[in-house]
Image: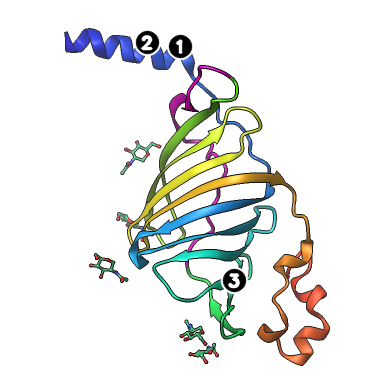
Amino acid sequence: MLSIALLLLVGLVVAQQPRPCTSPSQWEARIISHINNENITVQGKLSYDSVYQRERFIEQVVIGDDYYYETIALFQVRLEFVINLTARNCSRLPLTRPWRDFSIRPDAHSYGEAYIGSSASPSTGLLITLWGGNYTTPSNDTVNYIGTWTYEACLPVSHTSIHPKYGITHDSFYDVSGGISDPNVFIPPRECLSDKEYAIRHTLFGASPK
Ligand SMILES: *[C@@H]1O[C@H](CO)[C@@H](O)[C@H](O)[C@H]1NC(C)=O
Ligand SMILES: *[C@@H]1O[C@H](CO)[C@@H](O)[C@H](O)[C@H]1NC(C)=O
Ligand SMILES: *[C@@H]1O[C@H](CO)[C@@H](O)[C@H](O)[C@H]1NC(C)=O
Ligand SMILES: *[C@@H]1O[C@H](CO)[C@@H](O)[C@H](O)[C@H]1NC(C)=O
Ligand SMILES: *[C@@H]1O[C@H](CO)[C@@H](O)[C@H](O)[C@H]1NC(C)=O
């Protein structure tokens, strides 16, 4: 009985062989993010740029903390600016966590397709694809993850990852739009920069950071 079930399962997997789709490399979205290690859930706006590996996140709703932050993370130069929106001050920190890629990795394992909501009618459901797997970061940590993307256009819908040091992070994405509406979002605000840096901020933090 079990071997028949297994054979059927293998047959299904071989017959389907879905290919990972390609997500846009730059987009913006509303996200809800739960960081288990910190017991914090935040909702806010994320600008995501995988071309230059940078992220800007501005918190709009926070559960589990009293303060709101804006974060500009520049992974290529390993720098993070954390702006405390309550105190309007800024910390400049070395970036140690790895770049989070929200596209489907080429070696991801397919977990099939499904409708969020229901397939009963076009307005009750959204067809998504499910992918997961693991990868090893430059610091040799193995991260396990599972995520979902829209079947059409390959837009991120949800992402859960388990990092041995940073714990479980869960992100849900809404209102995704392609591209970055304002390229200046990755330029740290005045309170993060010295006068000298501020004067040349576009050169330092513009489209292709050095
Ligand atoms: C998060 O909550 C759990 C359970 O309430 C607690 O044990 C843990 O210390 C909390 N972590 C932080 C960083 O507050
Ligand atoms: C952010 O600012 C608030 C209010 O000024 C302060 O109480 C809080 O500790 C600050 N957060 C951090 C991480 O410094
Ligand atoms: C920002 O201001 C808050 C409250 O005045 C203070 O607790 C915090 O240490 C400050 N952070 C920085 C980076 O200056
Ligand atoms: C990681 O993924 C590979 C295939 O990509 C798989 O063979 C391996 O069992 C996975 N390891 C863990 C710990 O999940
Ligand atoms: C990475 O981790 C694995 C297993 O934890 C270990 O076998 C391997 O030697 C490590 N590699 C490096 C470069 O540290």
Q: Residue at x 45, y 11 (%)?
A: 15
- Can you say whether 134 is above or below 22 in the image? below
Q: Are marks 1 and 2 in contact (CB under 8 Å)?
A: yes
The span shown in magenta is 97-121
- Label 3 Cα crowd, 10 Å radius (few <14 / some 14-19 / many 20+): many
Q: Position of residue 107 (x, y in %)?
A: 48, 36
Tell me the SS state at disc 3. Answer: strand
Q: Residue at x 47, y 45 (%)?
A: 159
Query: Could you tell whether 147 is left or right of 207 in the image?
Result: left
Q: Are marks 3 and 1 in contact (CB under 8 Å)?
A: no
Q: Nearer the viewer, residue 156 or 25?
A: 156
Colour scheme of this structure image?
Answer: rainbow
Q: Nearer the viewer, residue 133 or 125?
A: 125
Tell me the SS state at disc 1. Answer: helix
Where residue 210 sits, quadrant-wise, is: bottom right
Q: Position of residue 24 (x, y in %)?
A: 68, 42
Q: Is ligand 4 within 8 Å of the beta carbon of the residue shown at mark 1?
A: no
Give amino acid for label 3: Glu
Instruction: Looking at the image, tell me whether mark 3 or mark 1 is earlier in sequence order.
Output: 1
The residue identified by callout 2 is 11
- Can you say whether 83 is above or below 167 in the image? below
Give amino acid for label 1: Ala
Please tell me whether residue 112 belongs to the stretch shown in magenta.
yes
- Label 1 Cα crowd, 10 Å radius (few <14 / some 14-19 / many 20+): few
Where residue 87 sits, quadrant-wise, is: bottom right
Q: Quadrant of ligand 4?
A: top left
Q: CA distance from mark 2 to mark 3?
A: 49 Å
The residue identified by callout 3 is 70
Q: Nearer the viewer, residue 164 or 170?
A: 170
